[in-house]
């Protein structure tokens, strides 16, 4: 055991954040600390680091072990370059290297015993330098910087001029190079693109030390951790396995707790009914028996009511107007800022019902594409053509659409005056705003809460084409799952930018990868993209000989035709599914009408009518059986 957390309590005023929190981290273990926003995750990390004092309890690090910590926000400053800042981690090696160089210069002018003594000293220093991997530390620094997304031309930038995200990446690089025995990471992937996150996953998996990670990136947690520590309502529960294993086990435990509560509640109600009945007999024996049962009832363990099995209300968001099949066509799109060309000659199309994720490295122009499509920025060249009956809505990271002076309820009711109070409350509840919380002012909400209001507003709009720019950035895991459910049920078209691979895997039906100034198309989710990425890049990004180019062009046309055919097949399947669901509804309604007719006294006395109804009911049952079989096949 390298770290032991024992019975930690922490409150801020009346808010008890942590209550008797206990767990431990083993050597070499990779663990996740999860919980909703405000559960106390960052608070606990600060207590472990000694930056906050617990009200009671302790966090004990094993003797002679080093601990490292990456906070969410960094305040690095100074004139050091990025490269120099990381080299400070190996200051001891730099000093030793200088001593070795100085010794080499001295040996050139020495002889006899003095030379022999200097050579011994030189050998000792060289051996120590090699033991500490001194001949590779500069390449190690370069590898870490590149892995975290810094290009070589950026190595010379001054730390004081960097953005907050860049400073966090520099701090993460320093921490990894320090190689402490246990690392605490608070949202390490927030400022990394997909390639950098994948690099970090591999680095941590190969790291000999222990790691405790706070992160909302479920794909990242699935790859890295073998234990999940959940903070909930101030308490803690530990699960073995990765994030998916934790999610399944938590759901099973919650179902079991809920079943135990329901059974106990039913038994209590049964006992109370028996007691009430015995008392109603109003006899000495029955009253004594009732009193005896009351004593037993008072000693019964009654479990607390657990959280609901599913606190999220299922709400289906359906556009009021259905767009045409061809939703959007982009041709020859180009954008540059000064001498920096982001992309040119981009072509792509969106079709009704598609959920398309736009991915790519930071700085490739993904958000710029969304801004161009929504008229926020102008393209340098190319055209954006919307299809018939398309109504679009746009969610940007800054959430400019919200009115800070309004309450949550006013924000929705003013935007959609035709909705009833019940409809508004149901929509807000689907995004975890219930009770008096709906009367909070927008200005008082956290970034994640504002994001949920903005997303709720967008989903309620008349838009049948939704653009989303990093929609999960401010959301905790529970809120991300709400958005995933809403988008999966959304019947319109969605085009979004995201680096959340788990979210993409759950919601995308197609992926466009913006890489090397081109858009590569993948019909499938993120797992499919990973499976096909190498083959597609090899086919479309490798320089071609003239004869290869002709062959590739022919293949590209064939692939595009196959993609169009696949998209058409999916659209037909969705339409068939909608038609069969409508037919089932009509058949069920007619069936209910016939059942009601059987109860009519006038019908009961008319044998001919009863016979006709019976025949029709038998036909309906057969038709329904066939319809349900077809529905299951389409599903």
Image (cartoon, rainbow, N blue to C red):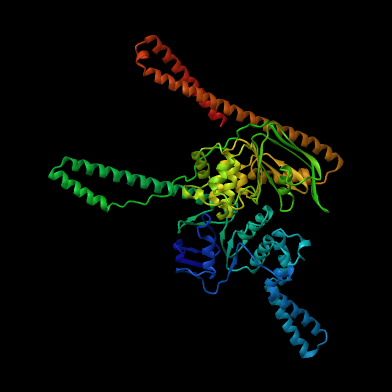
Q: Nearer the viewer, residue 367 or 630?
A: 367
Residue found 19% across the figure and 49% down from its top: 291
**154 horizontally vs 590: left or right:** right
State the image coordinates of residue 587 (x, y, percent, origin top left): 49, 22
Name the side, left or right, on which 132 lies relative to 62.
Answer: right
Nearest to the observer: residue 108 or residue 75? 75
Q: Work out whether residue 249 can be spotted.
A: no
> With 414 as the anchor, is 537 left or right in this view?
right
Q: Residue furthest right?
A: 546
Vertically, is 120 above or below 397? below
- Give residue 445's position: percent from left, percent from top: 56, 54
Q: Residue at x 47, y 24 (%)?
A: 588
State whether residue 46 is above or below residue 100: above
Quarter where residue 394 is shown? top right
In what quadrant of the picture does the C terminus appear?
A: top right
Which residue extends farthest top? 608
Could one spot residue 579 in this view of the protein? yes
């Amino acid at each position: 055991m390298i770290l032991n957390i024992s019975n930690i309590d922490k409150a801020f005023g009346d808010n008890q954040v942590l209550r008797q929190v206990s767990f431990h981290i083993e050597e070499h273990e990779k663990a996740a600390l999860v919980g909703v926003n405000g559960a106390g995750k960052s608070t606990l990390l600060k207590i472990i680091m000694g930056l906050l004092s617990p009200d009671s309890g302790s966090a004990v690090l094993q003797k002679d072990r080093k601990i490292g910590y990456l906070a969410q926000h960094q305040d690095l400053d100074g004139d050091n370059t990025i490269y120099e800042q990381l080299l400070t981690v190996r200051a001891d090696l730099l000093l030793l290297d200088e001593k070795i160089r100085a010794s080499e210069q001295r040996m050139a002018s020495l002889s006899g015993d003095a030379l022999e003594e200097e050579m011994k000293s030189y050998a000792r220093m060289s051996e120590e330098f090699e033991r500490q991997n001194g001949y590779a530390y500069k390449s190690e620094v370069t590898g870490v910087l590149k892995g975290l997304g810094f290009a070589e031309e950026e190595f010379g930038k001054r730390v004081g001029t960097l953005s907050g995200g860049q400073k966090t990446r520099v701090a993460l690089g320093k921490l990894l190079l320090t190689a402490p025995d246990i690392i605490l990471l608070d949202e390490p992937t927030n400022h990394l693109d997909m390639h950098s996150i994948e690099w970090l996953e591999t680095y941590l998996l190969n790291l000999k030390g222990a790691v405790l990670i706070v992160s909302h990136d479920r794909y990242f947690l699935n790859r890295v951790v073998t234990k999940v520590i959940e903070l909930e309502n101030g308490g803690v529960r530990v699960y073995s396995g990765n994030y998916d294993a934790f999610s399944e086990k938590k759901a099973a435990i919650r179902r079991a707790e809920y079943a135990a509560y329901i059974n106990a509640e039913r038994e209590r109600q049964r006992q109370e009914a028996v007691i009430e009945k015995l008392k109603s007999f109003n006899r000495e024996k029955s009253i004594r028996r009732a009193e005896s049962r009351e004593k037993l009832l008072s000693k019964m363990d009654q479990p607390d009511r657990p959280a609901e099995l599913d606190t999220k209300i299922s709400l289906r968001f359906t556009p009021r107007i259905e767009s045409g099949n061809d939703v959007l066509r982009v041709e020859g799109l180009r954008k540059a800022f000064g001498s920096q060309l982001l992309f040119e000659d981009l072509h792509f199309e969106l079709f009704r019902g598609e959920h398309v994720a736009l991915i790519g490295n930071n700085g490739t122009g993904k958000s710029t594409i969304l801004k161009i499509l929504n008229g926020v920025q102008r393209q340098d060249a190319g055209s954006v053509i919307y299809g018939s009956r398309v109504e679009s809505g746009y969610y940007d990271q800054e959430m400019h659409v919200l009115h800070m002076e309004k309450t949550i309820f006013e924000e929705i009711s003013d935007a959609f005056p035709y909705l009833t109070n019940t409809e508004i409350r149901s929509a807000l509840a689907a995004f975890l705003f219930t009770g008096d919380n709906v009367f909070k002012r927008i200005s008082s909400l956290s970034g994640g809460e504002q994001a949920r209001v903005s997303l709720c507003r967008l989903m309620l709009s008349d838009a049948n084409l939704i653009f989303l720019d990093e929609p999960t950035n401010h959301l905790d895991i529970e809120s991300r799952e709400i958005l995933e459910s809403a988008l999966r049920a959304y019947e319109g078209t969605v085009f979004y930018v995201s680096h959340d691979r788990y979210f993409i895997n759950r919601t995308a039906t197609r992926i466009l990868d913006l890489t090397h100034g081109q858009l590569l198309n993948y019909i499938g989710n993120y797992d499919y993209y990973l499976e096909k990425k190498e083959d597609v890049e090899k086919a479309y990004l490798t320089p071609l000989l003239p004869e290869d180019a002709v062959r590739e062009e022919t293949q590209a046309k064939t692939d595009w035709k196959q993609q169009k055919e696949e998209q058409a097949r999916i659209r037909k399947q969705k339409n068939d599914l909608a038609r069969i669901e409508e037919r089932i509804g009509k058949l069920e309604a007619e069936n209910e009408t016939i059942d009601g007719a059987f109860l009519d006294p006038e019908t009961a006395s008319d044998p001919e009518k009863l016979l006709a109804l019976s025949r029709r009911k038998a036909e309906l049952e057969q038709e329904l059986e066939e319809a349900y079989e077809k529905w299951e096949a389409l599903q």
